[in-house]
Image (cartoon, rainbow, N blue to C red):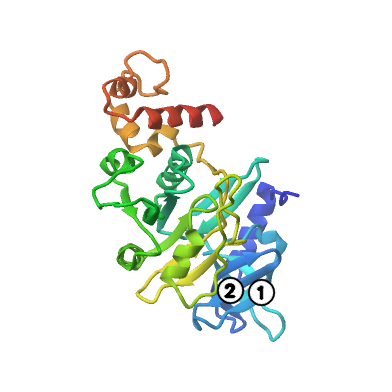
Amino acid sequence: MARRRLTRQQQNRVRQAQQSVDLSDPANHRGRVISHRGKAVEVEPLDQPGDNLQCSFKPSLGSLVCGDRVIYRDEGRSPLIVALLPRDNLLQRQDGFGHVKAVAANVTQLIVCLAVEPEPNRFLLDQYLLSAEQQGLKARILLNKIDLLPDFRDDDDPFELRRVYEPLGYEVLPCSIHQPERIAQLKQRLKNETSVISGVSGVGKSALTKAILPEIDIRIGEISEYNREGRHTTRSSRLYHLPDGGELIDTPGVRGFRPVLDPALPIGDGFPEIRAAAQHCRFANCRHVNEPGCAVRAAVEAGKIDPLRYEHYRKLLEQG
């Protein structure tokens, strides 16, 4: 059953209740949600890192998610989360039933994990990148399992990811858990960031997290011989601290990702190349579908915008 939505009046009451929390009260403490599974919320106290607590929370707070900053009350009984502090951002998706699922909050970087096997899904990738653009997050593309490509070289581009995405400002980083130098490169990109690694099941997210943090006990699944897709191994998002600085949030694999879009922002603004070309359209409200004088469609026809990216833009526009 989907979590019931709070009315605007209820949201205002929750906001007022949170604003009334007295931080000078020694029983109130600031913390950060490390994981949330079911009714169990693991919180790391900000004044005692590593000394995590299992907390309950007021249902009126709504959905809590990994990375949330909270205020909890500890009076010797089970700690209770009494307030959710304002979020810098919230990465969300819709499931197959149209229900909104929060992925992580207060992050700075999204690592979109693809793999040689199962083969990259460009539409899924573009949805992740659109969500990152709307949330103001850095985004990098990770091509994992390159050890499955014989004689792979750094200048190889087997799925044309570099050709399409690097001119748009997205770094494409080849990686393999069997090549320590690649893991070292990935660690450098994670340093001093709060990063989320997301992707479909089977691309090796949990194995990468294990390679980055070998002391952590993480379940690693296998690729199904039937459909060459992976089994879900990560059941809930979890935040890990990195020894060189920064945090890494490992998320459950998904077979589809539909971002929760901001209706106030045109979808085209989440595609850098469409956003740039749209400045030259004849009409300011051009949707880049069949309007006359559309600079975006002209750029597609001239080969300046990847036609598959444009197709994905049109698909998302229709879904919206």
Residue under the image location 61 percent in, 72 percent down: 42
Q: Position of residue 82 (x, y in %)?
A: 64, 69
Residue with the most extreme left position: 155
How many other residues sit within 10 Å of disc 2, few (<14), some (14-19) or many (≥20)?
many
Q: Is residue 75 above or below residue 80?
A: below
Residue with the most extreme bottom position: 76
Q: Position of residue 50 (x, y in %)?
A: 51, 81
Q: Position of residue 94 (x, y in %)?
A: 60, 44
Residue under the image location 37 percent in, 56 percent down: 147
Residue 36's mark? none
Answer with mark 1 or mark 2, whichever residue precedes in sequence: 2
Q: Which residue is mark 2?
A: 43
Asked if the residues shown at circle 1 and circle 2 are in contact, with their CB atoms under 8 angstroms apart, the answer is yes
Q: Which residue is mark 1?
A: 55
**SS assignment at label 1:** strand
Q: Is residue 273 left or right of residue 95?
A: left
Q: Position of residue 61 (x, y in %)?
A: 66, 61
**SS assignment at label 2:** strand
Q: Amino acid at mark 1?
A: Cys
Q: Is residue 297 above or below residue 66?
A: above
Front in this rendered view, residue 65 or 243:
243
Residue under the image location 68 percent in, 41 percent down: 97
